[in-house]
Amino acid sequence: IAGPTTSEVPVASDDAYIPLLFKNGGLDDLDIVAVHPYNWRFAPEYSGSFERLTKLRELCVQYGKPDIEIWGTENGYTTSMTKNPAMGKVGNDTGLAGQAAWQTRFVVMTLAEKLLSKVFVYSMHDYYDRTNAEHKFGLSTGYRSAYDQFAAKPVLIALANASHILNKADCTDKIVAEDQSTYAYRFDAPGEEDVIAMWSTNTRDALTLSLGANEVTFVDMYGNEQKLYSND
């Protein structure tokens, strides 16, 4: 049994839905805690989602199931500019690059921080009304798209790339800037080279790492590779 499958993660007070549910024994009947950790109007680092998921884990510990899996059974970001103008400021004015960046960062962060065991992305494709936020969460275009019908949006390519690179990898180290603008997560997978997932919401930030190597492979969000070499 998976539940309570709430919209967002209502844990802000003792009187919120999930704390009351757990207090009254609801957690005892669950095999998986399922929530919809939405806050699509903000970049994931500043949305409050991770603080709420951390509180949710604390509640699971408090009520006797510290190791129960938490699944994000619905999460996504719309490219509707009328409802989410901030998205258009991320890379271009269509929202496509912003959707790809925000969704991929959400998945990487929640898995790295072990806040969620699984993330289910909403939805498979767009619907017809481009001014309706609910119709523009798709991983691909829809049947009334102004572009090619059912073509992959950048978010689908970015998520596929992250899944391919980080499959079976565990986060072993991290660097997070005090202002939450710059992130670096180190992942290790048996028999594979270490991977560092890095990004910054501040284009002027600089991060210097000592990697113990004079050659690395840089892979962008969409899987394009480039060899980088040190001067040593």
Image: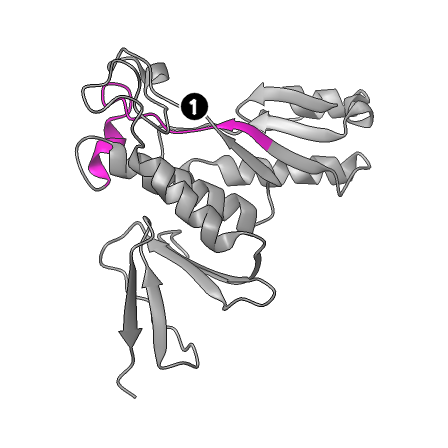
Q: Residues within 10 Å of mark 1 (few under 14, many from 20)?
A: some
Name which residue lies at 35% across and 82% down. Answer: 214
Magenta segment, which residues?
72-90
**Image vertical order of residue 56 relative to residue 3, above or below:** below
Q: Which residue does the numbered mark 1 point to in the structure image?
A: 123
Relative to 176, 98 lies left or right: left
Instruction: Determine whether the residue tagged by mark 1 lies in a helix, strand or loop.
Output: loop
Q: Is residue 45 visible?
A: no
Q: Position of residue 13 (x, y in %)?
A: 62, 26
Residue drawn at the location 32% of the way across and 21% of the way down: 136
Across and down, in percent, residue 52 comes to 56, 35
**Three-letter code for the amino acid on which mark 1 is drawn:** Ser
Asked whether, in this view, residue 165 is left or right of residue 42, the answer is right
The image shows residue 204, relative to residue 207, as above or below, that is above
> Is 4 situated left or right of 78 in this image?
right
| Residue 92 highlighted magenta (yes or no) | no
Quadrant where the C terminus is found in the figure: bottom left
Q: Quadrant of residue 85?
A: top left
Q: Quadrant of the N terminus?
A: top right
Coordinates of residue 126 in the picture (x, y in percent): 33, 19
